[in-house]
Structures are given as C-alpha cells and as structure tokens.
Amino acid sequence: MKPLVPVSPGAKVALGVSFFVVFFAVWSIATFGGFVQKTFLADPVSMFQSGWVLLTEHGFAKDIGMTVWRVVGGFVIAALLALPLGVAMGAYKPVEAFFEPFVSFARYLPASAFIPLLILWAGIGEAQKLAVIFIGSFFSLVLMISVVVGNTRRDLVEAAYTLGSSDASLVRRVLVPGAAPEIAEILRTVLGWAWTYVIVAELIGASSGIGHMITDSQALLATDQIIFGIIVIGVIGLVSDFAFKWVNRKLYPWAQIGR
C-alpha cells in the first residue's frame, strides 16, 4: 500500500464490500448482544422486516418515488441554470466580477433557513420542496463550475487564438470541452448534497416522501423504520453515484487515467 497508487478493480470491490460486512457485524453485535437497547437502535433483522412491511403494506415505494422525483427535479433545474452562468463567469471576467460576490454570499446561506419563507411564498406543495433543493444546489454549482472553466490551461487558449479562433468559438470548442470532465464530477458531487436538502424539506410540511416517513416513525419511536429510511437514501445515492461515474468514464475516458 503506497500513497496515490491505485488498486485493481477486483481489490477495490472487495475492500468496499468488506467495509459493509464489518459495519453490519458491529451493528449486529451491539444490538443482538444487548449492548444497545432496541428503543435507541433496532437490530438489522428487525430493520429489514419493518422495511418490508413499509414497502408491501404502507406504500413506502410511492414515498421513495416522490423523494427521487423531487431530488431529480430540483437538481436538474439548478444544473440547467447553473451551467451557462458558471461557464459565463469562468470565461468572462466582467461577468464574474458582477455575479461572484452575490453567489459567494448566497452559497453560505443554509437552504433549510429558507423553508419558512418558501412555505409562505409557495405553500407546502412540490414547488416549495423543489425550491429548497434548487437553492441548496444552484449557487455551489455556479461557483464551482466557474472556477473549473476559469482554470483552463492558458496554452490551449493561446493555441486556439493562434489558429484563428473567435471568442465565442473559444468558449464553445476549448473552455467547455476542457472543463467538461471536472464539471461532470461537480454535478455528481452536488447531486449527493441535494439528497440532504430534500430530506430537510420533507421533514416540514410534507405528506409524502422518505423524510415524511422518518418524521412519523420518530413520533412512534420506531427506530427500525427510521434506519430503513436512512439506508434507502444511502442505497439510492450510491446507485446514482455509480451511474454518474459510469457515464463519466464513457464520456471522458482520458480523465480517468491514474484514478
């Protein structure tokens, strides 16, 4: 084991699976061994049994679908608006000087702090939840994309101008393609953040969704259901993360060298 030396794909999978094996083993010992009361931490078997009941008898699959729809909807809206603005800020310094102070300011505002206002403005329907995810994702996306585009290698820019490229062509054919692999990674990272915002949005004023189920389970002290909801979020997030990685490898294979 040496610093920055990648492991083989097989070893990577084995190590990743090993962590979950150890995690569930420690969890089982702590609960089945009586070290932690069931009121505070349900055992894995009870958790999966309760999860099955939620899925088969209480329509939890619909809650999962609603949460996924909210995350995807809010994130896609944020990404579609953040991409052009981030590229413009990275490419054109006057645009960056105009927007960057406000974007940097807004990036530090917690999305959850806007929930009371959003409920007043948009009610407790889907618009409010999409807005929370949008606010939590948009400003970080803009700033991170602008930094990546602005860090394009200067020799590529000079070479493009030497070959007769116009300003618009430079942005379209040099800056955006050069930054595309890192932008894809930024989108993958911020999508993970979006999951935290949707759960916060669903904890208040929601009648469906994983967050709503977790809130109801808390009132009943049903830690098995709470843990199942948390694990479902993690599984969906893991699947979406792997999907993003797979797409990135197919679109930008040269960017994966050494990873």
Image: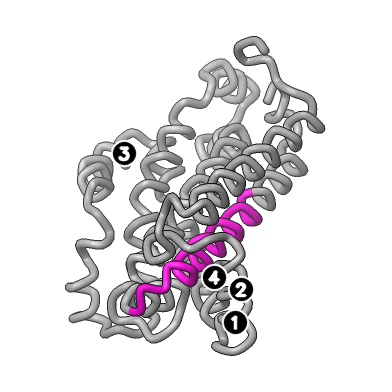
Inspect the image, locate mark 1, and give the three-letter code of the amino acid beneath it.
Val
Give percent across and percent down for residue 99. 27, 45
Inspect the image, locate mark 3, and give the three-letter code of the amino acid beneath it.
Glu
Inspect the image, locate mark 2, and give the three-letter code of the amino acid beneath it.
Gln
Give percent across and percent down for residue 126. 39, 81
The residue identified by callout 1 is 53
The residue identified by callout 2 is 49
Q: Quarter holding the C terminus? A: top right
Q: Any magenta on residue 45?
A: no
Q: Nearer the viewer, residue 222 or 104?
A: 222
Give percent across and percent down for residue 208. 44, 83
Q: Secondary structure at mark 2?
A: helix
Q: Which mark is residue 68?
A: 4
How crowded pointer 3 is (Cα within 10 Å; few <14, some 14-19, many 20+) is rated as: many
Inspect the image, locate mark 4, and give the three-letter code of the amino acid beneath it.
Val
Label 2 close to label 1 by CB (< 8 Å) = yes
Point out the stretch of residues depicted in magenta.
Answer: 220-241
Mark 1 or 4: in front is 1
- Earlier in the chain: of badge 2 and badge 4, it is 2
